[in-house]
Image: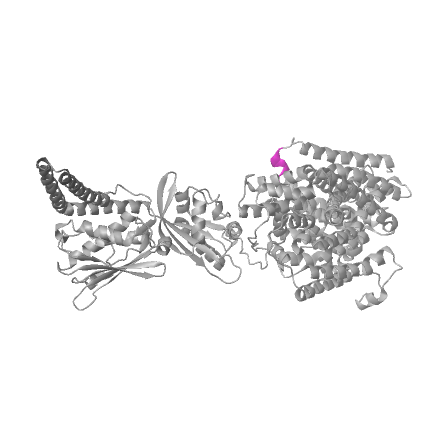
Amino acid sequence: MVYSVSDLILIAGCYLLFLFAVAWITERGWLPAHWVRHPAVYVLSLGVYASAWAVYGSVGYAYQYGYNFLSYFLGISGVFLLAPILLAPILRLTTTYQLSSLADLFAFRYRSRLAGAMTTLIMLIGVLPLLALQLKAVAESIQILSGTADPRDLAAGFCLMMVIFAILFGARHTTAREKHEGLVMAIAMESLIKLLAFGAVALLGLYGVFDGPASLNAWLDDHPEMLARLYYPLQDGTWHSMIMAFFVSAVVLPHMFYMAFTENMNPRALITASWALPLMFLLMALCVPVILWAAAAGNAPTPPDYYALGIGMISGGHGAVLGYIAGLAGASGMLIVATLALSGMCLNHLVLPASPLQGQNLYRNLLWTRRILIAAILALAYLFYRFTGTDHTLVELGVLTFVATLQFVPGLIGALFWPSGNRNGLFAGLLVGFILWIMLLLVPIAYPNWQFQPLMELLGMRFQSGASQWHHVAIASVTANALIYAIVSIVTPMSRSEKNAAEACAVDSLRRPYRWELEAKSVDDFIDAMSQPLGPITATREVEMSLRDLHLPRTETRPYALRRLRDQLETNLSGLLGPSVSHQLIDDHLPYLPEEEQHSSEDIQFIESRLEQYRDRLSGLAAELDGLRRFHRQTLLELPMGVISLGADREIIGWNRAMESLTGITAENTIGSRLADLDAPWGDFFTRFSHDDNPHQPQQALEVDNQTRWLSLHKSEVMGAGTAEQAGGQVLVIEDITELRHMEAHLAHNERLASIGRLAAGVAHEIGNPVTAIACLTQNLGEDSDPQEQQEACDQILEQTRRITRIVESLVTFSHSGGIKLSEQVPVNLRDTVDEAISLLLLDPDHRQQPFENHCPASHWVKGDPQRLLQVFINLLGNAADASEKALPVTVHCEPRGDFLDILLEDQGHGIPDNLRDALFEPFVTSKPPGRGTGLGLALVYSIIEEHQGSIRVESPLNDDGGTRFVVSLPVHQQHAADPGHPET
């Protein structure tokens, strides 16, 4: 049956409109989301690999090369059977870094614009024969069914139709992050129609030409040469190179990369595709020999490439339309997706690097540029078909593309599995392999009269055309490509950015980004910096989109968060402009601060998060080490003391739960910031301690919410070699001793009350003498009439009153302690403080006869709290008096020692027993008889001295007769040390 051209074009138009309606309904959200994201939709969309070559060319390939046609189906089946190993890493990279094509992947991995541009050019030239094949298949199928003479005009019309529908289907979004759900659903429907139509053609041949399987078997028995014809080509050993070519093309062809990775809406669907897609292609492969045998048995009036049409023509009716629809579905789906992918590659790696698009409406400019590129690519495909494709079979055109894709194998293997491969090796290998492909395959097929005979003879292709020896060309070009890639990569160095990208791309490796400091200090700085190349509207939109992706606030200023924002912004721009342009824009406008030596430590927070993601993949020793890491980390988190871990750049990388409880600041809001950025008063407090030379500050007071908190601070410099995270870091340990200080204050108050009790009798005696004198003087005033004598009596009464006041004030000052208060670090005259302590001790009847000698000069000043230092000397001098004979003096001397003043308190008592000396300053340790001491005095002394950044030690015995010397070291007050005439405090 002969069809008119208009009927066939109408069928094509209605078919494409139907697919557009499917896409439009999906985009409108009329289909349930679980339908759109179902793994079956993803599997069917991958059927875009079965282009017109699968429907028409595979039958012609079987006619010429026998069972070698199975290599086409085995290649893609093998790739997806190994999807967890080969495809999952690529999916991870494309999803994480918004990579939409192989050119994007190479540009990102090798950190080179040239890598992306070279990949795009080679891919464009290599895929043109396959695009031309689709135009040729549809045009010639219309020619066969309609009987027209020249199919080239038909190809032009179909090309124009495909330009329109390619733009309608895919060129409506500008970024890779905006998934084309409608396109995916339409391509899935196209694959389903193609599979059903191709299967229907096979059934038509089985039951229309033959009477069923039994009749087919009988025919094969009568024609054994048909089976032998399929087996014979296997003996030449070319099947391995064929499988390799189809294996690689299933990954790197632009339409397959686009559908498998860029438009993947459900990563788990890749697991389903690992078995479902091979099953789908197995069904198609089973149809090929049936169609071939049916066409041979019925003497189909078409070339072998179009036996799918011939079966319908010999069976009568409208059976030929099934073959036409199957071929149309395969061709249109491949053309739409391939041109969308190629237009993105050309835009990102050829147009934008050469002439960046600027203006207020960047998205509109990008969209129209992509539409123009779609039309240009299809025009190039038509020109290739018009000038070279009309004289060649579908098999020859397909072979050209499949061998061209092999040139990307070394670079792809290096990107995923060999971190040492570099851009120089990629350039050299691609160039050599591509030149061999052009000289030995493209030129001999396109122009048979142009033969490079010396090169062919060198490679063992003597007296044969490149088309007949394409498997030799494939092996020779890929081998040369791989060897040069490896050799050049080994002998040439890699840049630091390329090493970082290689670590990110390597399978099962952890990317280790470095904590370099950015010039931008806030989100507003990001927007201002990106407004110049993108425009303020686009810059604001992209930065805010990145903030939403990371769940960060607009007010974020933490260095760690800003680094993550920079990476996310580069990733998002990669989907918009391509990795090369986005990387250059980010480097130019959001640079890191320049450093003479980049010894920045690795970002341990990022590594920790990646380790958590990879936890389920670890096994053996790696799992044991990860368990140990988690145990140590949990130990730090649960420590009852606060722990802050700082990197070499003093960025916070650790903040345990005790710190959260102490400060009320969560680790999530702290990690990645600087100490100075913490809320008041913690920021300044910890920053001062971090920069201070003193590694221990045992008792520090801090006002928090109008309450005094007492903290003991300790720090340690973490030393290491190289640029590891730990090298040059710092660990701060913070202990909250507020409760301990309350207990000490309570004990000190009790100690003072006990001392006051012992002093009560002496106080009564000391006050009694001046009171008696006042009484006598008062009586004499009534008898004396001489004004001068009365005045002298009054003066004596006032003096006795002042004496009582001094006694009472000393007692009140000593006993006054109602709780913890902030110690006043003021100048303290040491001689006056010791004299006051001695005067108080002399009020005690037990010490009244004890001689005390104060030899401290009046010019010695220390820095401290006068009341607390008075408590120290009362306790020490009282202990010395208790241990001494009444006639033997207790002496106090002072000796300057640099910035400290040593106070020596000596007695000539019995000394301290050996068994008590080491524990002397611990609570409840005493050498006094029961009832004479609590054992808290020296513990309190030690705590006060430590609070004053001083020290205390004991020396006993001093000689054979005993004796004890306490040496107290206190910091000198520098101002009064330089000005000894300062008035007393």
Q: Residue at x 22, y 43 (%)?
A: 809
- Label count reads 0
- Let me know if residue 193 appears in the view: no
Residue 721: x percent and y percent? 50, 63
Nearer-the-camera pick, 124 or 336:
124
The image quadrant that residue 6 belongs to is top right
Quadrant where the image shows the N terminus:
top right
Q: Nearer the viewer, residue 756 or 385?
A: 756
Asked whether, in this view, residue 627 is left or right of residue 569, the answer is left
Image location of residue 380, percent across then percent down: 82, 47
Query: Left or right: 701 with respect to 326?
Result: left
Could you say which is closer to the camera, residue 767 or residue 694? Answer: 767
Query: Between 9 and 94, which is closer to the camera in this rendering?
Result: 94
- Residue at x 58% of width, y 58% of height: 598
* Residue 273, above or below 952: above
What range of the chain is rendered magenta? Answer: 32-38
Q: Position of residue 247 (x, y in %)?
A: 69, 54
Q: Residue most toward the right?
A: 149
Residue 697 belongs to magenta span? no
Question: Taking the image as drawn, is residue 495 in sight?
Answer: yes
Left or right of 603? Residue 815 is: left
Q: In the rendering, at what x and y percent does residue 854 appear? A: 22, 57
Left or right: 225, with 152 as reference point = left
